[in-house]
Image (cartoon, helix red, strand yellow):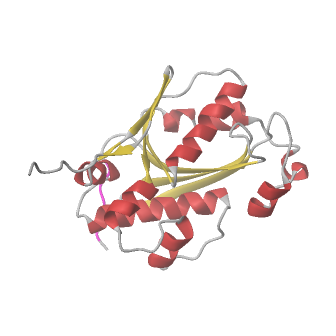
């Protein structure tokens, strides 16, 4: 299997789980680092939400209960552990609109500034690279790639997101997910201290009749 070289800067897949329907209620985060065409590091942290309100709906999805996070650090401390990794990184999430809104909302709860990095959405990438799939949910991509995982475990979700991104880059014959984004006309999103820009796919130009 050929390797995918990574240019300067880190590439990290991320996944959040939330305690309830509010985006600022992150209760766990999973991270998977990509280097040399492989996942080289995986981290998972439980997060103690500021409100500690857990909905039965969310508990049924990920299995995390209030007692599991009672002794966990809150969002700023958890994410600060990885601040050096995030700085200038290319981040990837499956349904990035959700995960990066969780990140923003969780920082908003503490009135903290956003970090600076670019990000990509593996759902949008998969829709362009594998349009034949019946769905582009993470479990469908995992099945397409022959991967078994525990869905809605933040670390395992991040690993599958990373693995899918690597496979898509390889299929398109490019060296990095940013090269993949260019090939499929995906404009990376951007998070920065004063706001954010969403990740978007350019629509093909219509020919004049």
* Closer to the camera in the image, 134 or 37: 134
Count of marks placed on residues: 0
Residue 47, given in percent of the width and then of the height, sits at: 75, 43
Going 33% across and 61% down the picture, which residue do you hit?
A: 128
* Closer to the camera in the image, 197 or 69: 197
Span colored in magenta: 2-6
Going 79% across and 39% down the picture, which residue do you hit?
A: 49
Residue 3, given in percent of the width and then of the height, sits at: 31, 64
Quadrant the N terminus occupies: bottom left
Against 27, is 116 above or below? above
Q: Looking at the rendering, which quadrant does residue 10 occupy?
A: top left
Q: State left or right for residue 5 relative to residue 143.
A: left
Q: Is residue 158 visible?
A: yes
Residue 189 magenta: no
Q: Is residue 35 visible?
A: no
Residue 201, given in percent of the width and then of the height, sits at: 33, 47
Residue at far left of view:
209
């Amino acid at each position: 299997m050929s390797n995918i070289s990574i240019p300067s800067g880190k590439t990290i897949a991320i996944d959040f789980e939330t305690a309830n329907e509010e985006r600022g209620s992150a209760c766990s985060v999973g991270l998977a680092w990509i280097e040399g065409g492989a996942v080289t590091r995986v981290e998972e942290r439980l997060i103690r939400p500021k409100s500690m309100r857990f909905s039965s709906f969310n508990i049924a999805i990920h299995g995390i209960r209030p007692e599991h996070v009672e002794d966990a650090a809150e969002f700023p401390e958890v994410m600060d552990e990885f601040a050096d990794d995030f700085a200038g990184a290319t981040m990837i999430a499956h349904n990035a609109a959700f995960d990066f809104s969780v990140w923003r909302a969780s920082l908003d709860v503490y009135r903290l500034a956003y970090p600076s990095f670019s990000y990509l959405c593996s759902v949008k990438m998969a829709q362009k690279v594998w349009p034949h799939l019946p769905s582009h949910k993470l479990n469908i991509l995992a099945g397409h790639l022959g991967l078994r995982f525990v869905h809605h475990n933040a670390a395992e979700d991040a690993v599958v997101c990373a693995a899918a991104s690597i496979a898509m880059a390889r299929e398109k014959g490019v060296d990095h997910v940013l090269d993949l984004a260019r090939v499929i006309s995906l404009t990376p999103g951007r998070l920065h201290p004063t706001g954010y820009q969403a990740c978007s796919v350019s629509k093909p130009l219509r020919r004049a009749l």
